[in-house]
Image (cartoon, rainbow, N blue to C red):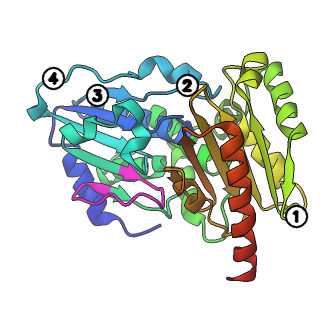
Amino acid sequence: MKNLTDATAAVLRFLSSYEHYYILSHVEPDGDCIGASLALESFLKRRGKTVTLLNEGPFDRPEIQDFAPRFHTTLPQLSSQDTCAAVVLDCSDYERLGKLSSLPERLPTAVVDHHATNDSGGEFALIDPTAPSTTVLIQLIIEAAEESPTPEEARHALFGLCTDTGYFRHLDHGSGDAFRFAARLVDAGASPRETHDAIFGGHSRASRYLLARWLQRVESIAEGRALLTYQTLADSQEFAPGERDTGMLYQLLLGVRGCSVVAFVRQENEAECSGSLRSTTDFDVAAIAQLYGGGGHKRAAGFLTDQKLDEVYAELRSIIEERLVRFETGR
C-alpha cells in the first residue's frame, strides 16, 4: 500500500469538523462498502457524532440482507447544512450512488475508496488502488486516531476485507499488508470462521438451481480463455429473486483450465442490465466496464446499462474477444 499519512490525517480532520455525517456507498452494495459504512458509523458515533447511513440497494446478497434496515434508501430531509457533511465510500464515481448522487454536491464531502478508476481529487480524498479493500482504509483512519477498532468495527472491517479479496484468494505476492491488517482485526475481536460463514453460508437451495442455470449457459470464446453467461428476469422470478451468489460462479469458472476472464450479464428489470467481469491476469476488465459507465479494479469490475440483454451480451462477447487477442499479442 501507499504512504497515506497526509491523506489519512486530512480525512481524520474532516471527520472531526462536523456534527452530522451522511455515509454513502455504491448501488448493488457488497460486503466491502457495507462493512466500511458500518465500521465508520461506529467510529464516528463513539466520537460523539451523529450518522445517517445511505445506500439505494438492493440488499439482495444473502451476506448483507440483515444490514438493510440500518440504511436509508432515499435522501432524507437535511438538517442544518452548516453542521453536516458527506462521506462517500467504496465508490469510483458519484453516478454509482444512484438516486443519492446529488447529496455530495450539496455538502462538504470526503471520499474513501480503493478503486483504480476513481479520479476524485480534493483535500479530503483517501484513495489507494493498492489497498485490498475500502474497509482497510477505514481501519487506517481509526488507527491514525491512535485507537484500535472495537470488536464490532473489527468484525465489519474483516467482513469487507475478506469480501473483496475472495477470502484472500485474489491476493498475490507482495500482499503482506493485507494479512497484517487482518491480524490486527482478529486481535481486536473479529473471527475468521464467523466471517467465512457470513460470506459463503446461508444460501437457499433455489440459488443452487440458479447457479446450475448459469453454468448450463456458459459460452466459451477465444478458445476457452474467456467464459460468459447470463441471467434473465424470468430466471430471477423462477428461482431465487433475492439471491446473487455470483462469487461461487466466478470461483467455478475461473477454475476451469485455460480460463482467465469471466463475464456475467444480468437482466435487472425491463429497462436495465448489469454486467460484472473478473480476470486472473493483467487483462484490464475495468477498462471494459468503463465503456458502459462502470468501473472497478483491473481484475474485478462492473457496470449498469440501459441496453437490452441480448445487445449488451453480444457486444460484450465481441469486445472481450477482440481485447483478449490484443492483450495476448501485445498489440
Residue in the foreground of this view, choosing between 25 and 197: 25
Dot 2: what SS?
Answer: loop
- Going by the numbered disc 4, the residue's amino acid type is Ser
- Please determine whether, in this image, residue 329 is positioned above or below residue 213: below
- In the rendered structure, does residue 91 fall within the stretch colored magenta? no
Give residue 188's position: percent from left, percent from top. Answer: 49, 41
Q: Nearer the viewer, residue 61 or 228?
A: 228
- Give the foreground label among 1 and 4: 1
Kind of residue at disc 2: Phe
Looking at the picture, how far across and down is residue 319, in whole percent?
68, 60
Task: Determine the main secondary structure of the stretch shown in magenta.
Answer: loop
Q: Cα distance, mark 1 to mark 3?
A: 48 Å
Q: Which residue is mark 1?
A: 258
Q: Residue at x 28, y 36 (%)?
A: 102
Chain-order first, disc 1 or disc 4: 4
Secondary structure state at the residue bearing disc 3: strand
Locate residue 306 relative to residue 36 in the image: left or right: right
Please name whichever residue, 233 or 120, is drawn nearer the observer in this view of the structure. 233
172 vs 14, left or right, is right
Please report the bounds of the magenta region as a residue range: 112-125
Residue labelled with disc 2? 59
Q: Is residue 242 above or below residue 155?
A: above
Ranked by sequence position, the earlier of labels 1 and 2 is: 2
Q: Answer left or right for 42 relative to 249.
A: left
Say the numbered circle drawn on residue 51. 3
Helix, strand, or loop for circle 4?
loop
Q: Quadrant of the C terminus?
A: bottom right
